[in-house]
Image (cartoon, rainbow, N blue to C red):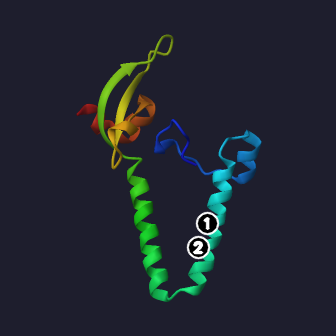
Amino acid sequence: IKWKGWSYIHSTWESEDSLQQQKVKGLKKLENFKKKEDEVKQWLGKVSPEDVEYFSCQQELASELNKQYQIVERVIAHSRKPAPSNEPEYLCKWMGLPYSECSWEDEALIGKKFQNCIDS
């Protein structure tokens, strides 16, 4: 799940049951996704091996693009959270995404993997 208002780094795997228990909005999207997946499985059963290979390559490319969205390209700004925590946070530009998708992230999260972006 790519949660609305959160960057891709906060995406999670969820079961259908957990989504229903949390009473999240967008369960219709889940139904549409499942329907589309069923249609793709049926289609894959009918097409040539070359088409299956092409589809698999396209899926892999899309997956690699999504992984990019979890890499900080640069840190644009920094600030401190209000008292009492007063912890630093950074405005992050994510690889492959427009500036409109920038998000504020805690130092604890960004500092682990992207200290070089903070330093620069």
Q: Which residue is mark 2?
A: 40
Rendered residue at 58%/86% (across/down):
46
Q: Quadrant of residue 76?
A: top left
Q: Nearer the viewer, residue 83 or 3?
A: 3
- Place of residue 39 in the rendered image (x, y in percent of width and height, measured from the top left): 62, 72
Rendered residue at 42%/54% (across/down):
67
Q: Which residue is most to the bottom?
A: 48
In this picture, residue 81 sits left or right of residue 119 = right
Local crowd size for mark 2, using a 10 Å CA cut-off: few (<14), some (14–19), many (≥20): few
Q: Amino acid at mark 1?
A: Lys
- Place of residue 85 in the rendered image (x, y in percent of width and height, measured from the top left): 49, 16
Q: Secondary structure at mark 2?
A: helix
Q: Is residue 117 above or below residue 70?
A: above
- Place of residue 104 in the rendered image (x, y in percent of width and height, measured from the top left): 42, 30
Q: Which residue is mark 1?
A: 36
Q: Quadrant of residue 108?
A: top left
Marks 1/2: CA distance? 6 Å
Q: Amino acid at mark 2?
A: Val
Q: Are marks 1 and 2 in contact (CB under 8 Å)?
A: yes
What label does residue 73 carry, if any? none
